[in-house]
Image (cartoon, grey):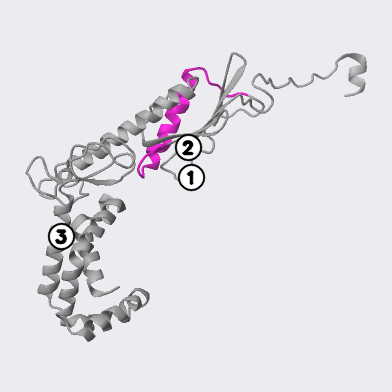
Amino acid sequence: MSLFDKVIQKGVEKGIGAAIGKSVQDAVGKAVEQKVRPAAEKLAGQAADATSQKISETTSAISEAGAAMAEAQEAAKGISKEQWGQAFSVLEGMANDMMKDMRVCPACEEPVKGDVQFCPKCGAKLPEMTVMELALCPKCGKQNAVGTDFCTACGEKLPGKLLTEEREREQDQAVLNRWAEALPQFPLWNCGGTHLDLAVLERGRFYFSAWFNGDSSAAQRAVQQYRACLSDVGFIKAGQYPSEDHLYKMVDGVCYHADTEHCFEGDSDAPGLYFLIGDEPTGGFYYVKPEPKKKADGLFGGLFR
């Protein structure tokens, strides 16, 4: 990596922040590089040619061994702090200018510039606010770095964070809508969590998961709450080996099975439940444990005791 490549990379990272996504970084970085590369090369030329060459030669060594850091620092002495600061300031300003009219598609995350309403890549409707406006505090007016959730001046929740939360609620509701259509025999999940997901494993086999953001206790309580919901609508322990981890309900000759036995085999804060249609327990739904045989009484019974 040459000196000007390093300047561009660091400046863009500082200007747009890591939280807004790689797609935006790539788009802004490419545009900035095209405009700034000649200026950055000129800046590098202000230092001795040997210094620039030394930085280029030692870059790979820096990533592999900490011992090379001292040599690189010595080589960089020819570039003043003012020069570095000037380069970063220019790059940061350019990156922010380029994002003033940039929007990110909520469907495919394509960065789109200009006054357009629909994503040219997937056709989804674009948000009204640009990525810069999403970081503008509505309370105190401070322009925060793109990707910031709360204002660094007053602590107000920023529009970008509000938009993200709204999208997450819409996505979770879409999952519950699919549940209502595909699994009407099972009570709808109303036990909390976010980032809901419902996957079809195969015909009559479904997998549902919810995320509790590191709170494993809340995840366990949610599973217990859902088991109670199942019991309230007639799901019971059944079969030869009854267990609260496997609850069943027979409807019009079809057995519906809610499996919560394996819900914490992955992450402890993201329980996963299996829903199976047409799946009876071992021994059958109507299995009844046989009565123990009674001992025979009378003359002959006594002979064989």
| Left or right of 253 in this view: 132 | left
Mark 3 or mark 1, which is nearer to you?
3
Tell me if residue 236 is in the magenta stretch.
Answer: yes
Label 2 vs label 3: CA separation? 44 Å
Over which residues does the magenta segment extend?
Answer: 210-238
Residue 268 falls in image quadrant: top left
Instruction: Tell which circle, 2 or 3, labels the residue nearer the N-terminal end.
Output: 3
Q: Which class describes the residues within 10 Å of circle 1: few (<14), some (14-19), or many (20+)?
A: few
Mark 1 near mark 2, Cβ–Cβ under 8 Å? yes
Q: Which residue is mark 2?
A: 272
**Is residue 36 rendered to the left or right of residue 56?**
left
| Residue situated in front as seen by the camera: 257 or 288 | 257
Residue at mark 1: 266
Residue 53, horizontal then vertical, whole percent: 26, 82
Image coordinates of residue 4 in percent, x first then y, are 22, 71
Q: Is the C-beta separation of discs 2 and 3 under 8 Å? A: no
**Mark 3 lies on residue:** 92
